[in-house]
Amino acid sequence: MLSSIRGDGPYINHAMAVAESTMTCVMARESAYSGMELTWDMMMNSKLDLQPKNFDYKLKMDVPPLPVRASTNSSELMTAPLPRGHPVAAR
């Protein structure tokens, strides 16, 4: 890998694998929090924005509530409220 960085070896680019791995982790987290099966397309078309609105070292940020484990009871899954801004909640 060092020879690739120096330009002496073959070009190595793992960006796509890293991006897909990260998106898979985000999908797993959203699925666990909502208790719903999410698809890749649902996540790619999601309007969910997890970034802070401002970036500043002095910015005071609220501590978000702890996530609640999703139920395995399908009737509870259909009635459980989804977090505000969740991609499935807007449907």
Image: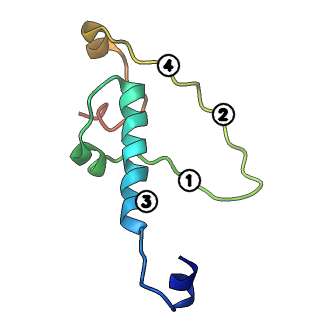
Along the line of sight, the residue nearer the viewer: 49 or 6: 6
Report x, y in % for residue 80.
35, 15
Label number found at residue 32: none
* Mark with earlier residue (1, 4): 1
Query: Which residue position is annotated with label 4?
Result: 68
Dots 3, 2 in contact, CB < 8 A: no
Amino acid bearing label 3: Val
The residue drawn where x is 26% and y is 29% is: 37
Give SS at disc 1: loop
Amino acid bearing label 4: Val
Amino acid bearing label 1: Lys
Mark 1–mark 4 Cα distance, whole angstroms, equals: 25 Å
Query: Which residue position is annotated with label 1?
Result: 53
* Mark with earlier residue (3, 1): 3
The residue drawn where x is 51% and y is 92% is: 8
Residue 91 lies in quadrant: top left
The residue drawn where x is 66% and y is 36% is: 62
Query: Which residue position is annotated with label 3?
Result: 18
Query: Which residue position is annotated with label 2?
Result: 63
Look at the picture and state if 49 lies above or below 15. Answer: above
Q: Residues within 10 Å of mark 1 (few under 14, many from 20)?
A: few
Look at the picture and state if 46 lies above or below 29. Answer: below
Residue 14 lies in quadrant: bottom left
Along the line of sight, the residue nearer the viewer: 20 or 69: 20
